[in-house]
Amino acid sequence: MAKYVGLEWASTGWFGVVLDDDGGWDTGVYPSVWSAWKYHSDADRILIDAPIGLPADERRTCDVAARRALGRRGSSVFYTPVREAVYRETLEEAKAVNEAAADFSIQNQAWSVVPRTREVDEFLDMFPSARDRLVETHPAVCFYALNGRRPLDASKRTRDGVHRRIELIAEEYPDAGARCRAAIERYTTPSYAPSVGSAADVVDAVAAAVTARRGPDGWTTLPETPPADDRGLPMRIVHPADTAQTRLTNLSPPE
């Protein structure tokens, strides 16, 4: 039976949602990508909210396109540092390397996710067999697509924002509403010792899993023809295609 996985970093581990073609649904928390792969290496597709493919000397086209599509919500997509900067030990060293190589600085928020970026990059270097099944997505772009190619008004950190995102997922996957709420209750309580960081982590992982279940025929890829990095990894972000199968404009990095 085909299996589809969505992974979202959730403060202390990767929160995963597993779907299958018969409506099966499972969830779990994994301390590392290696751990998630141990349990789900048989998955047909795994979509993860983490950069795959690191640039050498410029911004990734997919990051630029995603930020422009999201408009006022574009700041939720960080510019991915160059590979050499990702492997530096301090932010100061990484900024100096990135500015010299690509002429842009590293956002402090982007640096906070560098450990996950490095983890995924190392994993794919060690397990090349995962390259055709582990694919980058971004929840803000997924919800933008599910919302009729419009950025959502409410932040995912608010009750209204979580509710709206669950509604959008339920339009795609009818059982998702009740199951999202059950997972939120299970993994975010008690508040003094939650298994995951927030309800937003849950709905983001569900969006990734639902997109994985669609498969490439139901995706839009940013950019439409992604370039590869120096290890041959495609630098792309996938998200649900809308009903008209339209494509976002293939935007180039700024001069």
Image (spheres, rainbow, N blue to C red):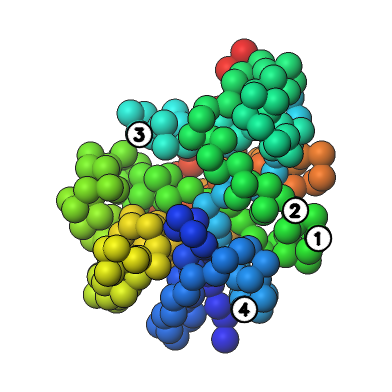
Residue 39: mark: 4
* Labelled pair 1, 2 in contact (Cβ < 8 Å): yes
Residue 126: mark: 1
Q: Could one spot residue 214 in this view of the protein?
A: no
Q: Amino acid at mark 2?
A: Glu
Q: How many marks?
A: 4
- How far is mark 3 from mark 4, CA to CA? 34 Å
- How far is mark 1 from mark 2, CA to CA? 6 Å
Q: Which residue is mark 3?
A: 73
Q: Secondary structure at mark 2?
A: helix
* Labelled pair 2, 4 in contact (Cβ < 8 Å): no
Sequence-first disc among 2 and 3: 3
- Judged by depth in the image, the label closer to the viewer, 3 or 4, is 4
Question: Of 137 and 37, which appears nearest the observer?
Answer: 37
- How far is mark 2 from mark 4, CA to CA? 18 Å
> How many neighbours does mark 3 have within 10 angstroms: few (below 14), some (14-19), or many (20 or more)?
some
Q: Amino acid at mark 3?
A: Arg
Q: Which residue is mark 2?
A: 122
Determine the residue positioned at 41% across, 31% down. Answer: 75
> How many neighbours does mark 1 have within 10 angstroms: few (below 14), some (14-19), or many (20 or more)?
few
Q: Position of residue 219 (x, y in %)?
A: 51, 54
Q: Secondary structure at mark 3?
A: helix
